[in-house]
Amino acid sequence: MVSRVIPVDPFDLVIFGGTGDLARRKILPGLFRRFCAGQMPPEACVVGAARADMDTDGYRAFVGEAIAEFGGDIANDTENLGAFLQRMSYVSIDARGEKGWSELAGLMREGMVRAFYFSVAPGLFGDLAERLNQHGLTDADSRIVVEKPFGRDLATAKELNRDLAAYFDEGQIYRIDHYLGKETVQNLMAVRFGNMLFEPLWNSQYVDHIQITVAETVGVGGRGEYYDKSGAMRDMVQNHLMQLLCLIAMEPPSKFDPDAVRDEKLKVIRALDAVEPHHIVRGQYEAGEEGPSFREEVNDPRSRTESYIAMKIGVSNWRWAGTPFYLRTGKRLKARCSEIHVVFKELNHSIFGEQEDHRNVLSIRLQPNEGMTLGVTIKEPGPGGMRLVDVPLDMSFADALGADGADQTDAYERLIMDVIRGNQTLFMRGDEVEAAWAWTDPIINGWHTRGDVPKTYDSGSEGPVDAVQLLARDTRVWRKVSS
Ligand code: BG6
């Protein structure tokens, strides 16, 4: 199966923070991939803007190195690389001063889609928005792209929303949550709303509980300073896991349109119950073969920040009341895997007499090896009588769809193309982000007020043992963390 690549309109994209880590690892290699695929048109231009003193030739060399390091299979496409680098230029700019702005204005062309990527600390969002306006660089069709973290609590998120709203309409603001750009995350919506099979069963009458796991093997590494102020709750749950929960729990939108989808997600966030302290387990990894302990990595022997969190969440609406959502995410775990498991209820009557617990589980694997598995119960082969056994109906997207099923288009490149197309469906709206913080804040404040200390867990394990208890108390078990 060959996926269709429809070129986007020619654009001018300015990357503030153009020499930063995200630009190097994701944005620039992603743009190059879109260029090679014919989706980024040859007339498009990219301007790196940052404080560093560099000229365009220096920036082109920088971009070339980023692609060599992070471009994967396209890194050696020298022919395209030459043409791509010609589309790059660089401006040394001061977000809070005058330096570089008129030079930047001189690079902007009429008649192009104009987008500004704020790949900088959130403290600069307001300054950049103001400068762009002051220098007449934007019009009603210009777009800005902002990165997470979008605030660190409700108050700061509101402040950021206010700063941006002073110069831009909501329809011009693209708040990135890169999880929404992952192929399989979008597939969640296709599976739910493109099939007759699942939707009638998608409620508390048939679903016993839902598990969402995002496990990572990496530690916090060089990001200790940021991470110690953030922790798994702010870094992963408030955004990525919350988005996954929304896509699983939301009502069908009337159409696949940005506001229709985001309205439904917002309703889910607003229906989340406050979480009881005993429904949360926080953890910190210990030193192991994989590296130093969390406290060593964040350089604070008394840090109370969590590198792991597991929680039980109730959704108080007609569809989900009574069906808990169990979420967990952590660093330095046994395997890297992101999975969602929809665990259906047991049959209310078995015609086969006493049997072990058999139930259907729909497992959606986001990474690695994207795919879906439906656990079904069949007869155990052989003459042993009517004994039942669970087998997986397995669909790896790579096997089912050929090379394109394994299409590794990175979330960022997909989302940047959506910005140029002017499609906000996979971006968070301001009220959605605020609602997520409104739910998160009391949880974090509670830890501080009570002085909660995270449990420790071994590097390379499945997390703290207390997390097992969290489900065991409800006579449930976590699915294994495996790659
Ligand atoms: C980022 C977090 O948003 O997502 C990181 O800040 C985390 O801490 C990363 O490692 C995980 O993303 P992915 O795409 O590798 O699952």
Image: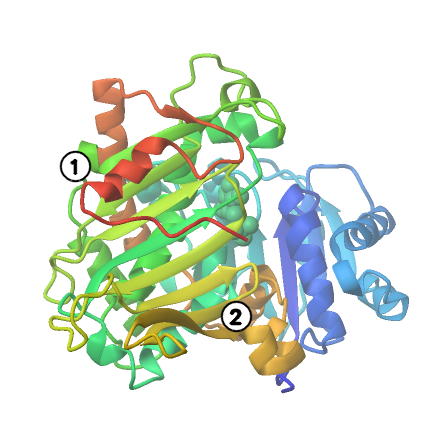
Distance Cα–Cα, label 2 vs label 1: 38 Å
Can residue 399 be seen by looking at this rendering? yes
Find residue 418 and name its label: 2
Q: Is 335 left, or right, of 74 in this rendering? A: left
Question: Which x, y percent locates residue 288?
Answer: 58, 25
Q: Quadrant of the N terminus?
A: bottom right
User: What amino acid is found at the position of numbered circle 1 in the picture?
Assistant: Glu
User: Against 40, is 439 above or below?
Assistant: above
Whether the residues at callouts 2 and 1 have beta carbons within 8 Å, the answer is no
Q: Nearer the viewer, residue 452 or 288?
A: 288
Q: Which mark is residue 226?
A: none
Q: Nearer the viewer, residue 184 or 147?
A: 184
**Rendering coords of residue 165 (x, y %):** 36, 53
Marker disc for residue 276: 1
Q: Secondary structure at mark 1?
A: loop
Residue under the image location 30 percent in, 32 percent down: 466
